[in-house]
Amino acid sequence: MKKGLTVANAYLLFYFLLVVAISEAMVWLEPRYYHDFFDGFWWAIVTATTVGYGDMVPHTETGKIIAMVIIIGGVVAVSLFTAQMASYLVAMKIQAKKGYEMLEELDRHLVICGFKTPRIEVLEGFKKRYGTNIVIVYPELVPELERVLNEHGLKFAKGEYNDEAVLKEARIEKAEKVMILNMHDEYADAKVLETVIVIRSLNRDVYIIAEINDPKYENYLIKSKCDEIIMSEEYNRFLLSKSITEPGMSKVIRNLLRTQNFHIVTRHPFVGKTYGEAFKTSMEKNEILLGVVTNYVTGAQLKKILLTKMRFGGESEKYKKLLTKAKRGEIEMDVVINPSDDYVIPEFSAIIIMER
């Protein structure tokens, strides 16, 4: 590409010098019709661009041959000049393209469908996991969204998030996780469900988190293989009722959600041990064990783990049954808060801890 441009520039420079030389030569060849350099240069430019006003024409045989050379060379020069200008304008457009529109290199990224002005600590948490590999899908680039994109270096795909073309622009096929926000407009839950179905058809392994208002959509989302469902209205109703029966509970829940020392830990040494043993060990590490999350893996991850265990480990019949359930989508994540001391922590589980 660079070599072609260099040759084109060399030709244009050569042709320009040729036109200048011919302009001077015409004054010498036909002084009766070309009185000075400007007359010759005017005629050469009009001839080179094939405009042909006809006010000045060569009369000698040599002049006519020179005119043919200028015309043939001019066609090439004008074409090259036009191509050069087009390339320059395209390059300028690409250079001017904002960082939040550069989606081509995204891979294993987070897609956020919808936009609500986020808390800064939430965004920072996202960035710790994904850096700037985060795409927000929204119909309009509103000022607040543009500010967030520029300040945090995030990406943007314009359009409705239930539109397959827009999701493809956000490179949903390469995404690791998707979060679908309920925008609380008309048919919002139905739109979320439709989006889950479209996303799952484009990427069967992506982890999908969806927010809905109406609990009746939960079953539909589960059947559509949505991995995690957040029912914001249910939480609101819970907090309102608890604030009446147990004043102060809303503040407790709010502080729990905001704390930075509240974690789900996937790698731990407690598989096969009782909850009582795990609780005691955690306390010795200045950690409070709150509960267990069973089947803390996606369906795709679980299939890979089970296939590996069947190939290299024992208990093949046990893992075959689990694999069959995983393929059918029958294995679901479950949360067990503060179980009894004799509860045995199962395989493929995570623990919920709070650091002191």
Image: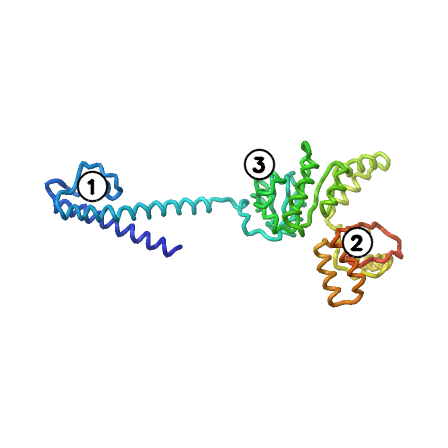
Q: Could you classify mark 1 by the number of other residues whose Cα lies within 10 Å: few (under 14), some (14-19), or many (20 or more)?
A: many
**Front-most of 344 and 352?**
344
The location of residue 105, given as percent across then percent down, is 55, 52
Direction from residue 27 to residue 251 in the image, left or right: right
**Front-most of 28 and 339?**
28
Say which amino acid is labelled 2.
Thr
Which residue is depicted at the point 87% across and 57% down?
A: 276
Q: Determine which quarter of the picture holds residue 283.
A: bottom right
Residue highlighted by disc 3 = 140
Quick one: which residue is furthest to the top in this view? Answer: 186
Closer to the observer: label 3 or label 1?
Answer: 1
Q: Secondary structure at mark 2?
A: strand
Say which amino acid is labelled 3.
Glu
* Residue 356 makes an appearance in the image: no
* Residue 170 makes an appearance in the image: yes
Q: Secondary structure at mark 3?
A: loop
Gap between marks 3 and 1 measured at Cα = 54 Å
Residue highlighted by disc 2 = 294
Q: Determine which quarter of the picture holds residue 60.
A: top left
The location of residue 180, given as percent across then percent down, is 67, 42
**Front-most of 182 and 224?**
224
N-term mark: 2 or 1: 1
Which residue is depicted at the point 78% across and 57% down?
A: 322
Direction from residue 201 to residue 309 in the image, left or right: right
N-term mark: 3 or 1: 1
How was this image coloured? rainbow
Q: Could you classify mark 3 by the number of other residues whose Cα lies within 10 Å: few (under 14), some (14-19), or many (20 or more)?
A: some
Q: Secondary structure at mark 1?
A: helix
Quick one: which residue is furthest to the left in this view? Answer: 32
Residue highlighted by disc 1 = 43
Gap between marks 3 and 2 measured at Cα = 40 Å
